[in-house]
């Protein structure tokens, strides 16, 4: 009988601690390391609610974001498409933003809420998100060029959505139209989704690099993150943004400067100057020591990111008892046994990240300088 009350106390103790921490367990919180000089912000800047063609109340988006440990979200309702308007009449296109912005829970967890809207037209204009707007209503215009001009007036960051959507582009490849060329020239289009929902477009990455557009990845969620992604064993697609600090203004500055990596599970896409430091920071060297009486160097690597990372050995040395192609799952530690032939006091571990792209078909090679114990 003695253990029973103490067990009870133990359980209540746990409950009390959980209530205090107010943690959002049950989901899979996302984690990516900072890179030198910048904070890595986890963002999903393309989402919907019942205020356009989504199926949930806007506040659900905040709760989902907190469960996944995101730093910033935007609800980007279609300005021109409101299938629920008979039930939810909402002439003010700012309404879903205001509902979310007013949530104490968002403020308490320091979740940045970015004001956005989706400019929605058929081809060749297509769909684009304007974010960091101050008022969505002036973006509702007859002519799409007037909508983009109104967004520019508000200093919005504008990105081209699901460019490779087969319903708009039957070949599944993006077509850069004269309309978009004019928007880029006018400084009215600044980014492009290379990952939208589960679709990665290598052609969109080509456009991003050619046109110097910011590389974006978004969930474009209409239903529930849990149903569409988590329970299928996936994370939602996100954009990692390398900001000087965690604030809306820094986030905006970083997006205009193109400091991003788009992520969907084990696929990471970004400019080399940001993807390489991210990968470098994602792998921590735990130990490096020779197996006793051998010239085989044992190096333990831990992947501290939320993406499983697939690597290929690029060193002049071969491995003992491991394939030259190997995975380090998210959060896991793997051991390499490197045959250095003679004992070294330090080594450069050099690996190609096979699931990562700095350009179509181009995977970054990352180096870690490792002192030997
Ligand atoms: Zn959308």
Image (cartoon, grey):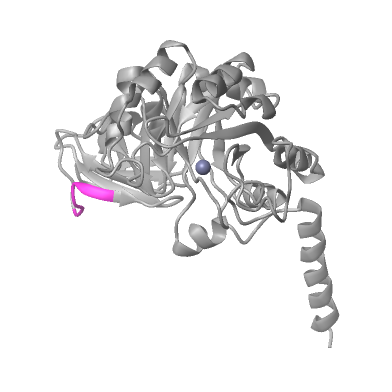
Q: Main secondary structure of the magenta part?
A: loop
Q: How many marks?
A: 0
- Could one spot residue 284 in this view of the protein? no
Residue at 30%, 31% in the rendered image: 175
Quarter of the image with the N terminus is: bottom right
Depth check: give the residue in front, 204 or 312. Answer: 204
> Looking at the picture, how far across and down is residue 314, in whole percent?
19, 35
* Quadrant of res 79: top right
- Could one spot residue 60 in this view of the protein? yes
- Magenta-colored stretch includes residue 19: no
> Looking at the picture, how far across and down is residue 206, in whole percent?
28, 27
Q: Image check: 358 left or right of 58?
A: left
Residue at 49%, 17% in the rendered image: 188
Q: Point out the residue furthest to the top here.
A: 186
> Looking at the picture, how far across and down is residue 272, in whole percent?
34, 24
Residue at 65%, 49% in the rendered image: 61
Depth check: give the residue in front, 165 or 4. Answer: 165
Q: Image check: 137 left or right of 126?
A: right
- Magenta-colored stretch includes residue 324: yes
Q: Point out the residue furthest to the front here.
A: 142
> Looking at the picture, how far across and down is residue 4, in whole percent?
81, 83
Quarter of the image with the C terminus is: top left
Residue at 62%, 32% in the rendered image: 116
Q: Point out the residue furthest to the bottom here.
A: 1
Q: Magenta region: which residues?
A: 321-326
């Amino acid at each position: 009988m003695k253990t029973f009350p103490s067990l009870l106390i133990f359980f209540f103790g746990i409950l009390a601690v959980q209530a205090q921490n107010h943690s959002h367990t049950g989901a899979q919180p996302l984690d990516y390391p900072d890179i030198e000089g910048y904070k890595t912000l986890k963002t999903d800047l393309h989402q919907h609610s019942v205020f356009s063609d989504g199926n949930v109340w806007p506040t659900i988006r905040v709760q989902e974001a907190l469960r996944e440990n995101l730093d910033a979200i935007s609800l980007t309702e279609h300005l021109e498409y409101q299938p629920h308007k008979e039930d939810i009449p909402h002439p003010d296109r700012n309404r879903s933003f205001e509902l979310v912005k007013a949530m104490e829970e968002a403020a308490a967890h320091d979740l940045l809420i970015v004001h956005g809207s989706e400019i929605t037209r058929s081809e060749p204009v297509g769909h684009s998100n304007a974010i960091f707007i101050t008022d969505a209503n002036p973006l509702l215009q007859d002519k799409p060029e007037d909508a983009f001009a109104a967004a520019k007036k508000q200093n919005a960051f504008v990105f081209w959505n699901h460019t490779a959507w087969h319903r708009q582009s039957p070949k599944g490849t993006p077509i850069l139209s004269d309309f978009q060329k004019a928007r880029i020239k006018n400084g009215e289009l600044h980014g492009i989704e290379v990952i939208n929902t589960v679709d990665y477009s290598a052609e969109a990455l080509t456009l991003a690099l050619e046109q110097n557009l910011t590389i974006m990845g978004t969930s474009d969620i209409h239903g529930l993150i849990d149903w569409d992604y988590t329970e299928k064993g996936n994370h939602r697609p996100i954009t990692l943004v390398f900001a000087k600090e965690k604030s809306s203004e820094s986030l905006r500055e970083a997006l205009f400067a193109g400091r991003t990596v788009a992520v969907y599970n084990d696929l990471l896409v970004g400019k080399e100057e940001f993807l390489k430091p991210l990968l470098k920071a994602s792998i921590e060297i735990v130990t490096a020591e020779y197996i006793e009486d051998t010239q085989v160097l044992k190096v333990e690597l831990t992947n501290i990111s939320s993406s499983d990372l697939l690597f290929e050995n690029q060193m002049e040395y071969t491995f003992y008892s491991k394939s030259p192609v190997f995975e380090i799952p998210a959060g896991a530690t793997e051991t390499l046994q490197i045959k250095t032939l003679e004992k070294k006091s330090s080594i450069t571990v050099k690996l190609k990240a096979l699931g990562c792209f700095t350009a179509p078909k181009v995977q970054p090679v990352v180096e870690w300088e490792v002192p030997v114990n």
